[in-house]
Image (cartoon, grey):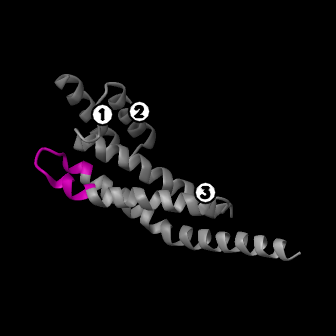
């Protein structure tokens, strides 16, 4: 199991360095395939969290670009949970034995999502208010 763990850590480190989401997803999937848990491996925890951070950043950029705000409120709430999770584990990445790339890339992906969150949050609020207004106006008619 130690040999597999070392192999997975090398895969994760390489994917983090290359900033390739697909490679990172493959490495995380491989770790989960071999029954590694995020609570047992700081590298896996960082990698899995980075996948979630990049996913939400990409989803919000796409939604904002195409003015598609349907269901955005629920997505913003879920992304906020991922941000809180990332902020909680970020200090753990500076522990000895954890490659520096795990913390550096986690922080970069966290910053990337935080940059799109204000606009996504604003659009989600407007969408929710618009839906509520339509509901009220529909009830009045």
Image: 14 above or below 139: above
**Secondary structure beneath label 1:** helix
Q: Give me the C-alpha separation between circle 2 and circle 3.
A: 23 Å
Q: Is the magenta stretch mostly helix, strand or loop?
A: helix
- Looking at the rendering, the stretch of residues picked out in magenta corresponds to 89-102
Image: 22 above or below 62: above
* Nearest to the observer: residue 81 or residue 90: 81
Q: Residue at x 10, y 48 (%)?
A: 96
Residue 76 in the image: x percent, y percent?
A: 52, 62
Which label was assigned to residue 26? 2
Residue 17 in the image: x percent, y percent?
A: 31, 45
Question: Contact, CB < 8 Å: mark 2 with mark 1?
Answer: yes
Left or right placement of residue 15 versus residue 98 in this view: right
Mark 3 crowdedness (10 Å alpha carbons): few <14, some 14-19, many ≥20: few
Label 3 or label 1, whichever comes before in sequence order: 1
- Looking at the rendered image, the quarter that the N terminus falls into is top left
Residue 78 in the image: x percent, y percent?
A: 48, 57
- Looking at the rendered image, the quarter that the C terminus falls into is bottom right
Q: Give me the C-alpha separation between circle 2 and circle 1.
A: 9 Å
Q: Mark 3 points at which residue?
A: 62
């Amino acid at each position: 199991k130690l040999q597999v763990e070392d192999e997975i850590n090398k895969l994760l480190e390489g994917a983090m360095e290359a900033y390739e989401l697909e490679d990172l997803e493959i490495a995380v999937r491989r770790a989960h395939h071999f029954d590694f848990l995020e609570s047992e491996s700081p590298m896996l925890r960082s990698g899995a969290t980075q996948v979630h951070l990049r996913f939400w950043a990409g989803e919000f950029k796409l939604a904002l670009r195409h003015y598609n705000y349907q269901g955005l409120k629920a997505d913003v709430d879920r992304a906020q949970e991922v941000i809180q999770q990332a902020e909680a584990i970020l200090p753990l990445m500076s522990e000895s034995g954890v490659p520096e790339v795990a913390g550096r890339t986690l922080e970069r992906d966290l910053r990337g999502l935080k940059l799109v969150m204000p606009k996504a949050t604003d659009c989600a609020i407007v969408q929710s208010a618009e839906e509520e207004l339509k509901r009220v106006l529909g009830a009045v008619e």
